[in-house]
Image (cartoon, helix red, strand yellow):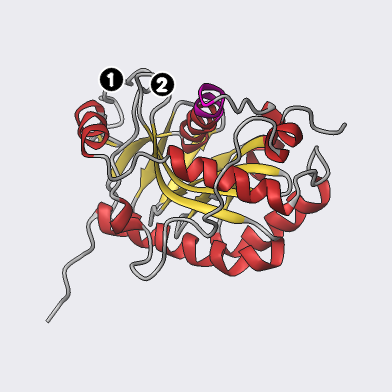
Amino acid sequence: MTSARPTPEERGAEGERLVSAELRRLAPQFGFSMVESVLLTPGMRTSQIDHIVVDSNGILVVETKAWSARVFGRDTEPRWTLRYPSGKTFQVQNPLHQNTSHVDSVRQVLRASAHPIDPDYVKGVVVLVGTDTDRLELDSLSKERIRDVASLEAYFADRRDFAINSGGLSERAIGELTGLLAGLNRAGDSEVEARHAVGRRPAVKRWESSSVRPTRPSESVAVQPSVSPSRHAPADSADTTSAATPRPGGSEMTRSLTAPAR
């Protein structure tokens, strides 16, 4: 009996589980903590983030895409094209642009919580699972920001050795920042999740003819596709690998994050 083909949601969830497992494997080696399946509320918007890593170099916002297809596009284009082995093609939002909005959301909620952070401390990376990227046209910076699961270890090694702030956050500051982000996570809040679902936009557009393409939506997207924390985090693990509680006022985290060493 032939098993049913997984849905895009199931593929996405499996991709996030694979990335989560690799991040958890690497966490002891590189000394970072994580918050996963995060729903933030920057202003009137909502923003769903797959994984947030906190290490000695600051915050890394990780976006996972599980596209079992060949992807075409340029780093500057707002939409990329997926071509599946069946020949079907789909348009998707450029995940680099999508993750830039996630990075901005993290900066905004920290600023609103009276913990402003220097922009140099918040970076983003996109992890593609099962995706053929040979046809992507990326500049050197964008190439560094697109990874697969197998290259994450090398990515974190480079981040440790060449980060702009030279690993200025102490273990205590990492714990404080992780605890703060966990406290800002609104996943599980039914009111916020309902608002998030109402405002969501379709993540994928399909067209049958290269001469008739769908209207491209604005790239200033207010919300991202809704995600349930229980679906994307391993059932036997907590959403964070650190339960540290942030200290108010002049914490070590606040002092460390406002002026990175040059």
Quadrant of the drawing holding the C terminus: top right
Label 2: few (<14), some (14–19) or many (≥20) C-alpha neighbours in 10 Å: few
Mark identifier at residue 219: 2
Q: Residue 183's x, y, as percent?
A: 45, 42
Residue 90 in percent (x, y) is at 31, 40
**Left or right: where does residue 196 sit relative to residue 82?**
left
Q: Residue at x 75, y 45 (%)?
A: 169
Q: Amino acid at mark 2?
A: Glu
Q: Is residue 220 above or below residue 16?
A: above
Q: Position of residue 185 (x, y in %)?
A: 41, 41
235 or 184, nearer to the observer: 184
User: Main SS type for the magenta part?
Assistant: helix
Front position in the image: 228 or 11? 228
**Is residue 108 highlighted in magenta?**
yes
Does dot 2 land on a helix, a strand or a loop? Answer: loop
From the viewer's perspective, tell me whether residue 218 is left or right of residue 88: right
Classify mark 1: residues with Cα within 10 Å, few (<14), some (14-19) or many (20+). few
| Discs 2/1, front | 2
Left of 163 or right of it: where is 9?
A: left
Q: Residue at x 47, y 45 (%)?
A: 182
Q: Residue furthest bottom?
A: 1
On screen, residue 135 above or below 21: above
Give the numbered dot on residue 215.
Answer: 1
Is residue 80 shown in magenta?
A: no
In this rendered view, identify the residue nearer to me: 174 or 145.
174
Q: Which residues are magenta?
A: 107-113
Q: Left or right: 208 with respect to 142?
A: left
The structure residue drawn at horizontal position 80% and vertical position 37%, both measured from the top left corner, is: 164
Amino acid type of the residue tagged 1 in the rendering: Thr
Residue 216: name its quadrant: top left
The Cα atoms of the two marked residues, 2 and 1, are separated by 12 Å
- Residue 152 showing in the rendered view: yes
